[in-house]
Image (cartoon, rainbow, N blue to C red):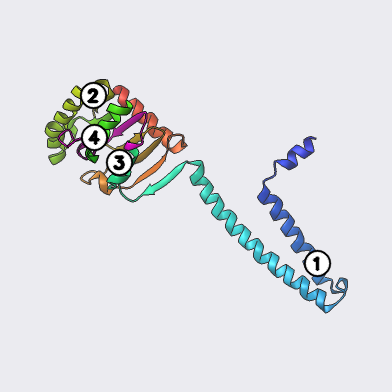
Amino acid sequence: MSVFNKIAKIPAFNIIFIATATCIGVLSYMLYKTDAVASPKQLGIISGLVTGIVIGMFQLLLSYYEYQKIRKFEEMSILDVMINRDERAFYENLIVNSNNRIAVMGVTASRFIEHFADLEANAGEKSKVLLTAMQTRNVRVQLLLPDPCFLDGPDKQTAENKVKAAFQKIKEIHGNKFEYKYFQHKPAHSIFIVDDKCILGPVFPEISSKHTPAIYLKNSSPFAQKYLEYFNTEWSNAT
């Protein structure tokens, strides 16, 4: 029984590879020992079989290599690799379908508020989808940003004036459903969490976040876990 269990654990690829290699060996031996072949017709058939099996073996190896690459992505639960983050419709769809939590770590969150939490917009407009999520589905929203003193130029002015005022107005309406905190260092990572998925990317100095790449993946990913832990730690330490 223990021998059977060991055999059962052998990967299917290894079984196929060993069986194919054995066939090639047997047929090649038959070709080498021509006296084992009864007729030229059988010789032609065996030659064709050897050629076909060898070609099939190479195709199998190539397919297995591609499979291994794809499996790595699947194991990391990567859903997509984004060239940039300037896809409003994509983020809007995530927010519209959110049911539990939206958490953002970035630079100023000005575009996020402008696109999805515009208090001045008319009722029903797409620029209010974040407000709708909090109001109708009790979605919790967390914004984690650098203290404005760690920003420069337009970003600093935006954070100190326009964005902070918008935060205060939203919190007055939605209370504990909307929270925002500031960490005491320059921003280095962009993190966007929606329920069980997240979008992770870098923050480059003097480059707008919408022009930087990102990875869209599930929170269960080993890659994502470190970022989520980082977010939670930063949130606990922020004020």
Query: Which region is colored magenta?
Result: 96-123
Q: Image quarter for residue 186?
A: top left
The kind of residue tagged 3 is Glu
- Does the magenta segment cover residue 114? yes
Identity, as a three-letter code, of the amino acid under mark 4:
Lys
Between the residue at mark 4 and the residue at mark 3, the CA separation in whole angstroms equals: 27 Å
Question: Which residue is tagged 4?
Answer: 186
Residue 148 placement (x, y as % from top left): 17, 32
Dot in front, 1 or 3: 3
Residue 57 magenta: no
Q: Which residue is mark 1?
A: 29
Label 4 vs 2, first from the N-terminus:
2
Distance from disc 1 to disc 3, alpha carbons, whole Å, reads: 65 Å
> Dot 4 lies on which element?
loop
Label pair 4/3, CB-CB below 8 angstroms: no
Image point (74%, 68%), residue name:
49
Q: Position of residue 103 (x, y in %)?
A: 32, 31
Q: Earlier in the sequence, mark 1 or mark 3?
A: 1
**Amino acid type for the residue under numbered disc 2:** His
Helix, strand, or loop for circle 2?
Answer: helix
The residue that mark 3 highlights is: 92
Instruction: State how far apart marks 1 and 4 are (Cα).
Output: 70 Å
Label 1 vs 4, first from the N-terminus: 1
Q: In the picture provided, is 80 more to the left or to the right than 132?
A: right
Task: Please tell me which of labels 1 and 2 falls first in the chain.
Answer: 1
Residue with the mark numbered 2: 174
Q: Quadrant of residue 92?
A: top left
Q: In the drawing, does residue 177 fall left or right of residue 76?
A: left
- Total labels drawn: 4
- Inspect the image, locate mark 1, and give the three-letter code of the amino acid beneath it: Tyr
Mark 3 crowd level (few <14, some 14–19, many ≥20, 10 Å Cα): some
Q: Secondary structure at mark 3?
A: helix
